[in-house]
Amino acid sequence: MLLKIVSIKEKAVPISSSIRNSFIDFSKMNASIVAIQTDVIRDGKPVIGYGFNSNGRYAPSGLLRERFIPRLLEAAPEDITNNEGTNLDPHKIFNVLMTNEKPGGHGERTVAIGTLDMAVWDAVAKIEGVPLYKLLADQYGDGTIDEKVFVYAAGGYYMPNKGLIELQDEMKGYLEAGYTKVKMKVGGDSIAEDVRRIEAVLKVVGSGDNLLVDANGRFNLKEAIAFGEAVKDYKLYWYEEAGDPLDYELQAKLSEVYPHAMATGENLFSLQDATNLIRHGGMNPKTDFLQFDCALSYGLTEYMRILEMLKENGWSSRNCIPHGGHQMSLNIAAGLGLAGNESYPGVFQPFGGFADNYKVENGHVGLPDIPGVGFEAKENLYTLLKTLN
Ligand SMILES: [Mg+2]
């Protein structure tokens, strides 16, 4: 008997927040959650894989309900399972989901498929009875697991009535919570004001090596260079997403003049877009970081293809620190040897953050030893996901 998918459910839920970066405010942001129930029984209960879309893109409910969920439910069991029919095959499922989809113009379908892909991998690891990071290390990596993953605290958002003191207090809170590096938003105010904000945060975190700045694609080339010039002496850990994420020439020209590490990629949602960045973005594999977020970009299945492409181009998985601050990317980081993962302490709840009993210590966090992605070890998230059943 081949394994079967019994049902797939989807719901849009708010992740609203009063924060703002240089480009958008998050007060109307939502996300899709999905549950894929299989007919496999573990511990007396049917295995259910859960997924959600990462922050920054809206719930793709229409695409999921009208196109991708029906496509997956209509697929023949042999087209979505491994050869023995004992587990789901994420790679075959990806091909099913992409049937009758034209290349290019990826749009929001990358988010819809990334959400389903997360639920598929959660189910696959649960059926195997192992944490996803272990399955990845054993089946796709070199068998070794990073017991602790580097995480940095992404915050420093613009908020109404938030001054330098409040910004400093926020950053002090991250250090007290166990983080060693923090990130703040820039580009939402004048360069002079952002420099004042950066200097205020540096007083808290000590050195530029502990501070990352994120312009969220706000700058044109002239502004990006001017900002880089204004902050280069701080030797920041990285300067993120200076210009439009698809403007590879801007990134390349900025890379010629900005002398320190840069990071980008969270808004590139496909292997081809990632390849174009590597080909044309002038980025440096010795210093720079790539932030592709599987949960926004066709899922882990596509992310593995991106890692393969990076390898062919002389990049390492250790150049990757994904966007999103969620448990899915944390599993990938631990199992496939990434450099780390983003973290948003207290923001984008209940999706942001990691297992409840795993505190950040010295800028690193561990993962629970339970089957799947680990959602069941994060109570506020699991409470929400369970409402799909
Ligand atoms: Mg960013």
Image (cartoon, helix red, strand yellow):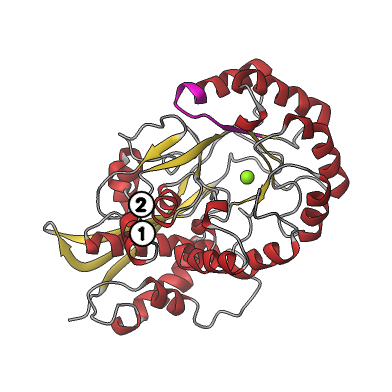
Judged left or right of residue 359, residue 299 is right
Identify the amino acid type marked 1: Ala
Judged left or right of residue 49, residue 311 is right
Residue interval drawn in magenta? 174-184
Q: Are marks 1 and 2 in contact (CB under 8 Å)?
A: yes
Give coordinates of residue 303: x percent, y percent. Answer: 50, 63
Quarter residue 11 falls in: bottom left
| Any part of residue 161 in sight | no
Task: Tell me if residue 182 is in the magenta stretch.
Answer: yes
Q: Which quadrant: the C terminus?
A: bottom left
Residue 137 tag number: 1
The image shows residue 263, relative to residue 7, as above or below, that is above
Residue drawn 83% across the image and 27% down it = 192
Residue drawn 25% across the image and 57% down it = 130
Quarter residue 272 falls in: bottom right
* 84, 134: nearer the viewer: 134
Residue drawn 56% across the image and 79% down it = 101
Q: Which quadrant: the N terminus?
A: bottom left
Identify the amino acid type marked 2: Ile
* 312, 211: nearer the viewer: 312
Residue 145 tag number: 2
Give coordinates of residue 115: x percent, y percent. Answer: 45, 60
Secondary structure at numbered mark 2: loop
Residue extending farthest to the right is 222
* 149, 28: nearer the viewer: 149
